[in-house]
Image (tube, helix red, strand yellow):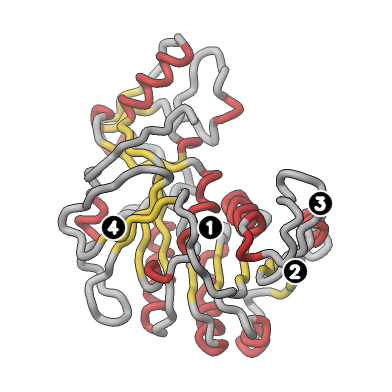
């Protein structure tokens, strides 16, 4: 892809400096993993432990585990679903990928949670049409009914809308009672310290609840989306690829940023849950490290257009969207 870059080592990850002393539920310092799409990574200073994973690794052994996915019809959840369906660890018949042909793979070990109010929607019918099991309920239901729903589930993966993040609290209670082996809370965004991003603070509340209940977990942070890092060019030639235009330049645009293609998140999640080393770890998933200035240079070179950029020098000039992670 346009913004892919290889051969990165020792990126300047300020968030690791802030988070390195965050205790996990065992009372020890949290360990961090880094997962990168096809890149060699050497080491990260001041991190307790670094486990380097790459999405092109092969031969990972995995005991069959049953996965329950929340939010499969959303943007990020859809990418996770596609990756799970494509991976042979979650199918019973290798008759060719649904994504590459019309042959239907019989899906086992994978179930999608759908709200009762959405059970008749076209998106839910499409899930069933792909051979994927669907269970319907509401997270506001009784803990007892949620525990029954989670019977025999090994891994829960959450991809919720911002408004539904706190509904993970009763889900965690039910997961503990049901004996779920690994819980992936809805993160899928850039990490930060508390008190900066409202949604991040809510996510940390969910993490705290998970820690208090000693529920085995994997917390997955990601780089900022490529699709939200591309500035708009005057001709509009890149508009179809842009989730939200990024023509504001912050603090000179020289700070390196971890970035990820949103479509790669699903592939990385599959890689993460298939590796036992990521259990009870915080994971950062990214595909490249680029500054805003480097991105702008690439865009101008590839499009032969001069960007219209706005320099932002103070916090008072920043207008964050309400959905900002």
Q: Are marks 3 and 1 in contact (CB under 8 Å)?
A: no
| Residue 40 found in image quarter | top left
Query: Residue 311 appears at what percent x and percent y?
Result: 31, 24
Query: Residue 10 appears at what percent x and percent y?
Result: 22, 45
Q: Residue at x 56, y 60 (%)?
A: 159
Q: Earlier in the sequence, mark 4 or mark 2?
A: 2
Residue mark closest to the camera, 2 vs 1: 2
Q: Which mark is residue 103?
A: 3
Q: Secondary structure at mark 2?
A: strand
Which residue matches tag 4? 193
* Mark 1 burial class by Cα count in 10 Å: few <14, some 14-19, many 20+: some
Q: Which mark is residue 162?
A: 1
Q: Earlier in the sequence, mark 3 or mark 4?
A: 3
Q: Are marks 4 and 1 in contact (CB under 8 Å)?
A: no
Q: Residue at x 60, y 71 (%)?
A: 67
> Is any part of residue 114 visible from this angle?
no
Q: Is residue 271 above or below residue 67?
A: above
Q: Residue at x 49, y 73 (%)?
A: 183
The CA distance from mark 3 to mark 4 is: 46 Å
Residue mark closest to the camera, 3 vs 4: 3
> Is any part of residue 192 visible from this angle?
yes
Query: Residue 282 appears at what percent x and percent y?
Result: 35, 64
Q: Secondary structure at mark 1?
A: helix
Q: Are marks 2 and 1 in contact (CB under 8 Å)?
A: no
Which residue matches tag 2? 134
Q: Earlier in the sequence, mark 2 or mark 3?
A: 3
* Mark 3 burial class by Cα count in 10 Å: few <14, some 14-19, many 20+: few
Q: Left of 100 or right of it: where is 278?
A: left
């Amino acid at each position: 892809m346009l913004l892919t870059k290889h051969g990165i080592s020792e990126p300047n990850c300020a968030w690791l400096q802030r988070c390195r002393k965050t205790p996990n539920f065992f009372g020890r310092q949290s360990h961090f993993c880094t997962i990168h799409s096809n890149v060699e990574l050497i080491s990260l200073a001041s991190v307790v432990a670094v486990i380097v994973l790459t999405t092109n690794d092969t031969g990972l052994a995995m005991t069959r585990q049953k996965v329950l996915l929340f939010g499969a019809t959303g943007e990020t959840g859809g990418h996770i679903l596609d990756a799970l369906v494509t991976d042979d660890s979650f199918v019973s018949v290798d008759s060719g990928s649904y994504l590459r042909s019309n042959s239907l793979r019989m899906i086992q070990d994978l179930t999608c949670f759908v709200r009762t109010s959405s059970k008749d929607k076209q998106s839910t019918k499409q899930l069933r049409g792909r051979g994927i099991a669907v269970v319907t309920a509401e997270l506001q239901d009784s803990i007892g009914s949620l525990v029954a729903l989670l019977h025999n589930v090994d891994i829960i993966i959450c991809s919720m809308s911002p408004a539904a993040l706190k509904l993970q609290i009763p889900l965690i209670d039910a997961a503990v009672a049901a004996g779920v082996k690994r819980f992936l809370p809805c993160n899928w965004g850039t990490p930060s310290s508390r008190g900066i991003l409202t949604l991040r603070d809510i996510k940390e509340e969910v993490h705290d609840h998970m820690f208090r209940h000693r529920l085995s977990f994997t917390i997955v942070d990601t780089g900022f989306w490529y699709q939200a890092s591309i500035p708009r060019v005057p001709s509009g030639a890149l508009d179809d690829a842009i989730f939200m235009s990024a023509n504001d330049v912050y603090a000179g645009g020289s700070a390196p940023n971890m970035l990820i293609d949103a479509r790669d998140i699903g592939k990385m999640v599959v890689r993460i849950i298939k590796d036992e080393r990521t259990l009870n770890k915080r994971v950062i998933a990214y595909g490249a490290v680029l500054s805003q200035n480097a991105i702008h240079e690439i865009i101008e070179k590839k499009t032969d257009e001069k960007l219209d950029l706005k320099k932002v020098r103070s916090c008072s000039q920043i207008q964050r969207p309400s959905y900002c992670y």
